[in-house]
Amino acid sequence: MINIFDWLVSAFKLGRDIRAERSYRTDAFRLEAQRVIDAFQAHGLAPNEVARLLPEALGHKASPAVLGDVNELKRHLSQISPWTTAMLALDPLWVRGRGSEPHRRIHSYKHISELTTFFREREAASEDDAVGLAERYQLHFYKQDGRPLSESRGTFVVLLTQEFAQLDGESFHRTYYLTEGHHFEHSPCVVHLLQIVALALHYRIFMSGHVLAAKHLAALDEGNGFASDLTSEASGLLWYPEDIFFRPLDGDLGWNLTARDWLEESLQDDQAEMLLRALPPKQQLV
């Protein structure tokens, strides 16, 4: 015979456990702490390495055990979360659970001065530092084939990485998006790409071109995840963005010259003087 009292007690306990589990999973502080830990992991930082990077004012409050445990870390979010957001250049909305893209974007499309200002400010800040922009920054270009730019089609994505720490000889980088919804069939997008390449040549920033299948490229462009995960399927095939300015036999010469004209027409006087100086004279391409 079923004991109704025992059945009701069991049902009550089950309901209570379900409510507790639901509250546990939707705890805003716990979810934010999990995003912070996920960000550490995506940037290759183990809890003990994070502890070494913490400023002295925070170091005594967050041990490696705390930094790797969601329930412990959520008690220190008021200080650790802002520090992590700044250190890893995360989107604050994503950290708070109100956005889907963890990485910040530098919106320089049709406004290359935004990226120019970004570099100028960091160049000024590093004047007393032995390590310059060329050593700290890298540019990564992703498209769906390794053909010359004149023959490329579809979406492309440009990411900027910046070294923010070195531990035991290993470098750690934060990531910024420089493009959004860019594709080769739209000439202003191509102009933006050329501006980025010219700016990188001016600052002598290392550039590399990668190949990513169309579906992975679309996911990378959307940015709903960490770049380290979204680019993990890149093939080993490399291409060289700067070739359009230095190797006249790479791709269609007529297209290359037209693209160079687009670049020159897009630059304002001060930009043209700075960026075009880093390029070889156009007559050398003919």
Image (cartoon, rainbow, N blue to C red):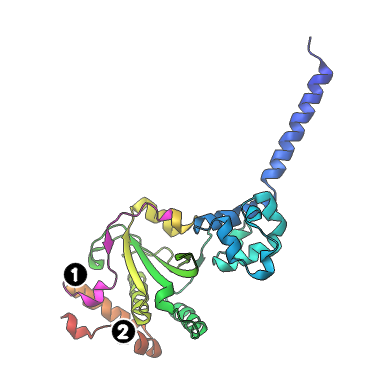
Chief SS of the magenta region = loop
The residue shown at (33%, 79%) is 201
In the rendered image, residue 45, in percent from the top left (x then y), is placed at 53, 58
**Of helix, strand and loop, which one carries label 1?**
loop
78 or 267: nearer the viewer: 78
Ranked by sequence position, the earlier of labels 2 and 1 is 1
Instruction: List x then y, in percent, for residue 130.
Output: 46, 81
User: Where residue 128 sits: x, y (%)?
Assistant: 50, 85
In the rendered structure, the answer to whether residue 202 lies left or right of residue 50 reads left
From the viewer's perspective, is the residue at label 2 or at label 1 nearer?
2
> How would you rate the neighbour count of disc 2 (Cα within 10 Å): few for under 14, some for 14-19, many for 20 or more?
some
Q: Which residue is mark 2?
A: 278
- Three-letter code, disc 1: Asp
| In this rendering, position of residue 215 left or right of residue 36 | left
Where is the C terminus found, in terms of image quarters?
A: bottom left
The amino acid pointed to by label 2 is Ala
Query: Is residue 74 shown above or below 274?
Result: above
Residue 250's disc is 1
| Neighbours of disc 1 within 10 Å: few (<14), some (14-19), many (20+) | some
Left or right position of 232 against 249: right
Quadrant housing the N terminus: top right
Which of 250/173 is in front? 173
State the image coordinates of residue 71 (x, y, percent, origin top left).
69, 49
Q: What is the spatial separation of the Cα atoms under label 2 and label 1, in whole angstroms?
A: 19 Å
Dot 2 and dot 1 residues touching (CB under 8 Å): no
Magenta stretch bounds: 230-251
Is 91 or 107 nearer to us in this picture? 91
- Taking the spot 16% from the left edge, 72% from the top edge, the residue there is 249
Q: Which disc, if any, is residue 75?
A: none
Residue found at the far front of this picture: 168
Secondary structure found at label 2: helix
